[in-house]
Image: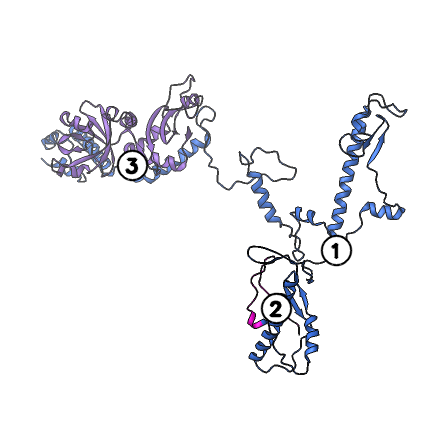
């Protein structure tokens, strides 16, 4: 377990900024953690273990140092992985964090929920609601109509273009969904 | 000019005699000034070295300087046949033994003297003892083989197994007045002997060094001493330079299982420098969680990111929209309070926010 160095921090924050925008401040600086025995709430910090980045509270980090480095599997919430070539990808486990701070949201119709959960990209006729002001390649969090976060992805079209699109066009490129907990249990 | 002719035969066996026609009749000499008798005498004076199967003619002279190559060749062949005949005669005169292949003759040892192959050995400088003996006038005395051993009362040899005056055989040593109580006299004797042996070894090496300086090392030691050059022309190897030594020392220092990291250093030895870069990470936990450096780092990155996207923070169109709506509301309220003209009552229809951004909504508010 080690903290991220500067380049890695930049990569992680950039990726997160795509999804949460200025709420990144909330995640990084103003988060309150009431986990430890200390009365004052600590902050959350990012730690890297075996190329996976975790979002952990300070008290948890302190206690995790008691575990041997090669025996430590995971701590806190995993938000993503670094690939062998140094690129950072967000994984599905950070969905709750993203959903709470998301800037751009898309609501799915119940009929196309299963399709998305199988890993397919989102088509226009599956979309129920969409927030304003989405630009291309913005990060988007996908919800069901009952406001259950289902996953996240990349916006393929801006909101303006979305209205003009034909019903079969892709609106959101799939990145991660909660169906992965069943489909790719081993890879997570 | 002396002519010699070497036969290429084996040393002990004699091949069948050379073709008879050329040799049985010695050819007449070319030079007419010599009489037959003189030539016979000269023939008798050929130096024949049977050990090398050679014959030397010391007194041969060309009567007149030869004019052409063929003359020289002819003369040489004639003289050579004479010499070969002489060798053959001498061979046949030796006592021979019978053999199925023919008469077998044992050749005598060769008499020809060859020049030295190696240079003369240099005289050895006298050893320390020799110098001392010369000074004092000590003569060398022949040693006896056996000596009488007082202890056992027998004659024993001087050195080696079961020798006279062996240290291990002394049962009792009388204590002298000078002896301290508690010292072991046997151990003392052993120590003294050891020191004598070591001293002698040192002297031996010193003598050898002196001999080597004079160039007169005995050959078996010269061969064994790998650091010294063997041939006379080769010089001593040059001393290694400082940087070469440093390189080698560095290699030797790191040639351990852990790269020389935990070895004790000699006084004045510099610490090892490693070629690769060691990557330094921030500590995992500092204080109660995040260290100050880490906090600063994250804040820096965050601020940079925020400033890069600062132009996106404010959604200008949305702000304008909201501002206009606020203004509308304000005007409507004011208008409702001040007068109840029906003019503004129709405005109640247009409270809904339109999707038409960018247009001033004031115009809409006024439409009926």
Q: List the residue tagged with mark 2.
A: B84
Mark 1 and mark 3: Cα distance apart in space: 102 Å
- The residue positioned 31% from the left and 35% from the top of the image is A15
* Marker count (numbered): 3
* Quadrant position of residue A145: top left
Where in the figure is residue B270, as x and y percent of width and height?
61, 40
Q: Is residue B131 left or right of residue B224?
A: right
**Residue B122 numbered tag:** 1
**Quarter of the image containing the N terminus of chain B?**
bottom right
Mark 2 and mark 3: Cα distance apart in space: 123 Å
Q: Which residues are magenta?
A: B1-22
Is residue A10 shown in magenta?
no
Q: Is residue B26 left or right of residue B309?
A: right
Label 3: how many residues lie within 10 Å, few (<14), some (14-19) or many (20+)? few
Among the chains, which one is purple?
A
Which chain hosts label 1?
Answer: B
Which chain hosts label 2?
Answer: B
Task: Give above or below for A33 relative to B241.
Answer: above
Q: Nearer the viewer, mark 1 or mark 3?
A: 1
Disc 3 on helix, strand or loop? helix
Q: Are marks 2 and 1 on the same chain?
A: yes
Check whether the beta carbons of the residues at disc 2 and disc 1 lie within 8 A of each other: no
């Amino acid at each position: 377990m080690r903290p991220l160095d500067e380049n890695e921090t930049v990569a992680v924050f950039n990726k997160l900024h795509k999804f949460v925008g200025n709420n990144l401040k909330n995640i990084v600086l103003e988060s309150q953690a009431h986990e430890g025995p200390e009365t004052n709430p600590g902050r959350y910090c990012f730690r890297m273990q075996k190329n996976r980045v975790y979002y952990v509270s300070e008290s948890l980090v302190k206690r995790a140092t008691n575990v041997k480095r090669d025996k430590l599997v995971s701590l806190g919430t995993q938000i993503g992985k670094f690939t062998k070539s140094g690129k950072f990808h967000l994984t599905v486990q950070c969905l709750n964090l993203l959903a709470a701070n998301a800037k751009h949201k898309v609501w799915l119709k119940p009929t196309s929920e299963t399709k998305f959960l199988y890993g397919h990209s989102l088509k226009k006729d599956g979309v129920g609601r969409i927030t304003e002001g989405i630009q291309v390649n913005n990060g988007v969090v996908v919800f069901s109509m009952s406001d259950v976060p289902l996953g996240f992805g990349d916006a393929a079209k801006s909101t303006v273009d979305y209205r003009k699109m034909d019903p079969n066009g892709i609106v959101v490129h799939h990145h991660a969904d909660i169906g992965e907990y069943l489909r790719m249990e081993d890879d997570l | 000019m002396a002519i010699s002719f070497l036969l290429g035969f084996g040393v002990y066996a004699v091949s069948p005699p050379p073709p008879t026609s050329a040799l049985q009749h010695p050819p007449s000499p070319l030079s007419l000034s010599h009489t037959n008798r003189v030539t016979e005498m000269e023939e008798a004076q050929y130096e024949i070295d049977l050990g090398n199967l050679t014959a030397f003619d010391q007194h041969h002279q060309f009567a007149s300087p030869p004019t052409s190559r063929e003359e020289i060749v002819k003369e040489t062949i004639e003289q050579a046949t004479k010499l070969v005949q002489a060798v053959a005669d001498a061979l046949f005169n030796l006592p021979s033994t019978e053999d199925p292949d023919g008469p077998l003759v044992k050749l005598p040892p060769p008499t020809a003297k060859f020049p030295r192959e190696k240079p003369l050995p240099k005289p050895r400088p006298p050893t320390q003892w020799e110098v001392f003996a010369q000074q004092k006038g000590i003569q060398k005395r022949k040693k006896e083989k056996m000596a009488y051993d007082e202890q056992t009362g027998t004659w024993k040899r001087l050195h080696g197994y079961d020798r006279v005056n062996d240290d291990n055989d002394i049962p009792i040593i009388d204590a002298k007045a000078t002896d301290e109580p508690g010292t072991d006299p046997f151990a003392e004797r052993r120590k003294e002997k050891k020191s004598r042996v070591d001293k002698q070894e040192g002297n031996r090496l010193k003598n050898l060094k002196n001999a080597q300086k004079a160039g007169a090392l005995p050959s078996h030691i010269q061969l064994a001493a790998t650091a010294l050059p063997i041939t006379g022309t080769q010089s001593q190897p040059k001393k290694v330079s400082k940087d070469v030594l440093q390189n080698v020392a560095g290699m030797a220092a790191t040639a351990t299982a852990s790269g020389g990291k935990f070895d004790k250093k000699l006084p004045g030895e510099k610490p090892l420098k490693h070629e690769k870069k060691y990557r330094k990470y921030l500590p995992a936990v500092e204080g109660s969680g995040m260290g100050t450096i880490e906090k600063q780092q994250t804040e820096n990155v965050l601020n940079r990111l925020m400033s890069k996207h600062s132009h996106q923070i404010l959604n200008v169109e949305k702000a304008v929209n909201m501002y206009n709506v606020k203004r509308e509301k304000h005007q409507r309220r004011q208008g409702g309070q001040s007068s109840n003209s029906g003019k503004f009552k129709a405005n109640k229809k247009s409270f809904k926010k339109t999707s038409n951004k960018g247009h001033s909504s004031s115009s809409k508010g006024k439409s009926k």
